[in-house]
Image (spheres, helix red, strand yellow):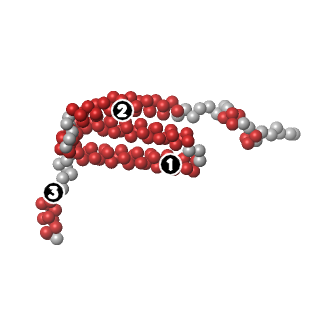
Amino acid sequence: MSYKQEPSIKCQSPLGRAKNHGSAKEGTHHWISQRFSAISLLLLGPWVLYSFYAGNMSSYESVVAWLQTPMDFTLVLLFIVAGLYHGFLGLQVVIEDYVHTQCIKIPTLIALKLFFALVGVMALLSLIRIQNTDLFKFNTEKSSTFLETL
């Protein structure tokens, strides 16, 4: 009884190894997500520029007053989220296409995701702090009385 041996994978051409494996089915979602974020940036970008130009945002107080309105707060938050997401998707494609060593590619993608998540959280906390400036004011009277009781 003889068994037919399968040809070694090393003997196959790259096309032969790739055939009949199907697609990864991730490219379409990634492409649509990047286009959606680009369209949202195209819509929100001119609004941000116009608001800064027409709103006379020359001082810190005027920017804080502008960001304390709910509509402007929401639109700036959407602009930041769309920009960060679009940037992440673009850099992810660059790393996946041009970094060929897996031991470098995977940690770089993880670091990229952590970096964009950290920047997003910091932006959100900054906007919340501006939105609720009364919550984060440091009350020197209470702290000095507390220190005096010690």
Residue identifier under label 1:
108
- First of labels 3, 2 by sequence position: 2
Image quarter in which the C terminus is found: bottom left
Residue at (73, 42) in percent of width and height = 10
Residue at (48, 31) in percent of width and height = 31
What number of labels is visible?
3
Q: Is residue 89 left or right of residue 135?
A: right
Image quarter in which the N terminus is found: top right
Q: Which one is in front, 73 or 44? A: 44
Q: Which one is in front, 97 or 140? A: 97
Question: What is the CA distance from the residue labelled 3 to the residue labelled 1?
Answer: 43 Å
Query: Where is 50 relative to 102, above or below?
Result: above
* SS for callout 1: helix
Query: Where is 70 relative to 124, above or below?
Result: above
Amino acid, disc 1? Thr
Give the x, y percent position of residue 6. 77, 39
Q: In this view, does 5 lie to the left or right of 36?
A: right
Q: Do the residues labelled 3 and 1 touch (CB within 8 Å)?
A: no
Residue at (38, 48) in percent of width and height = 118
Amino acid, disc 2? Leu
Give the x, y percent position of residue 49. 28, 33
User: Quadrant location of residue 66?
Assistant: top left
Q: In this view, does 16 lie to the left or right of 81?
A: right
Q: Which disc is residue 68 wearing?
A: none
- First of labels 3, 1 by sequence position: 1
Residue identifier under label 2:
41
Query: Where is 23 relative to 111, above or below?
Result: above
Amino acid, disc 3? Asn
Q: Answer few, some or many: residues within 10 Å of disc 3's Cα (few below 14, many 20 plus, some between 14 and 19).
A: few
Residue identifier under label 3:
139
Give the x, y percent position of residue 73. 25, 38
